[in-house]
Image (tube, rainbow, N blue to C red):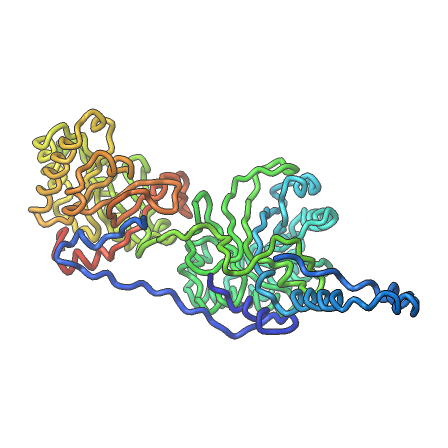
Amino acid sequence: MRICKRLLSVLTAFSFVGTGAVLSPSEAFAENNISCNIYDTTISLESKEASGSILQDTADENTVEASSMTEVPFNVFDIYNAHQKYVKLHSGDKSLMYKKTEGIDVSYAQGKIDWQAVKDSGIDFAIIRAGYGNADKYPYQKDTWFQYNIEEAKKVGMDVGIYWYSYAYSPEEAREEAESCYNIIKDYDIHYPVYFDIEEEGQKKLPVAEISAIIDSFCSTIESKGYYAGIYSFSSLLSSKVYQQVLDKYAIWVAHWNVKAPGYKGDYGMWQHSDAGTVNGINTVVDLDHCYVNYPYLISPDTYEPDGTETDETENLRPLSIDRGVASGIDVSVWQGKVDWEAVKNSGINYAMIRAGYGDLASQTDKYFEANIEGAEKAGIDCGAYWYSYASSPEDAVLEAKACLEVIGGHKFAYPIYYCIEDQCFSTMTNQEITDIINAFCSTLEKEGYYVGIKSYANFLNTRVDESVFSKYDVWVAHYGVSKPEFRKNYNMWQYTNDGKVEGLSGSFNLDYAYLNFPEIMAKNHLNGF
């Protein structure tokens, strides 16, 4: 686990210091080499004890009689143990820096909260909205439930942090927002960061340099007031719209809902994993958060009392690492209706797998195929395609291949053409029959210069398809709710969810990761219309 600059500062000072000077190295992806068999460059499945007793109060020590001191030798071990506890608390001992805690973030939208019920339900902390925009200029922009929330939460012994919802479009506006935030929170003790919430649609369209300057302006201003500053936004914005040197300076709170792990690849201390949680004491849905950094210790080491649940950076508190490959994708068909491809692009999606059609007639083209191709390409998203099969024999599969060729002809595809074998009609066939159908379709397209593959669920691919297929054609495996698909052979694309969310779009989507630089492969090998 990489330790960010803010945390390194704690390790390198005898007393807590809020700054540091170590920048984490950027992650790099190695290029995939293209072998003679273009399908063969694939991803394979990888088969303290508490410190001693504390010194007695000075007043108690002063009352000890000289005679009793003569009778009972002074306990030097108590002094040593007490000193060790002091050193542990004040030298930035790594064993206290990380801690798994559960939290919520709230605003006026949750109404009146029973904070004792919230705490009793197992919630450790709350991040409370203080307000939005420039509340000094417009006082009504202070969150109407802020004072109640922070006072009642602290009254029941809950640690709190702050977030400020931004409408800033310049560094100066962000600085003014920070001043507004400070004026509202200045009378309260806060043991979690003060987060700058940047997620407005208009802000996302600003250049990277401008967004980074806006974030830095708010955070540096709030830090100058003595607070631990942080950034909150969605995975896609943090991944693509903020300079790394800015991300390295502040605490990161990433939002990515309904996934096994957030799509953000950098360091993060907190993850908002749901926007539809339920908690005792709150009558509405509420955002739920996992926290991995022990912010109460980092922010107030002099008063922090360990409870034995702390750990160091060697323990992996965060969710299992997911290999997100080299590109993030979406696959769509008529079932998604009209897609806003600009919103898809802005969400961080790199490529789209588009259903071309189904069955053995070209007239069975997907109703939205041409519109999806045109919209995706106009938005700058690379495309691949898939054909949904109902074939009952190799001869039928050849007819499906010819229908597919007629539909996709005239288009260039930077990603493969996949044969989708997942209909219930295949459940009554033998493995050999299924394999023959796959070979018939894929070989027909391959002869026409297409990079082809097979798409299905992990269990089906493991049990119903002959292994010879996987060495001849690419594999796109579907397996949801896992950190890695349980497919025993090789794959170059993974459909990891059928319930994904895309910023700017409503509904659920199939989302994918690609593990090869497919556009480069197509261009170099003159495949798929290139």
| Front-most of residues 225 and 203 | 225
Q: In the rendered image, is residue 312 in sight? A: yes
Q: Position of residue 202 (x, y in %)?
A: 45, 56
Front-lying residue, 371 or 28: 28
Q: Nearer the viewer, residue 159 or 135?
A: 159
Measuring 15% from the left and 58% from the top, which residue is drawn there? Answer: 35
Q: Is residue 199 in view?
A: no
| In the image: residue 255, left or right of residue 496 | right
Q: How far from the left and from the top, in percent, is residue 11? A: 58, 70
Residue 362 higher or lower than 247, as above or below: above
Q: Is residue 283 above or below residue 207?
A: above
Quarter containing the C terminus: bottom left
Residue 357: x %, y % from top left:
20, 36
Residue extending farthest to the front is 71
- Residue lying at 43% horizontally and 57% vertically, measured from the top left: 237
Give me the residue at 15% from left, 49% from top.
Answer: 451
Residue 385 is left or right of residue 106, and the answer is left
Q: With respect to residue 425, does 98 lie above or below?
A: below
Please provide percent x and percent y for residue 193. Answer: 60, 59
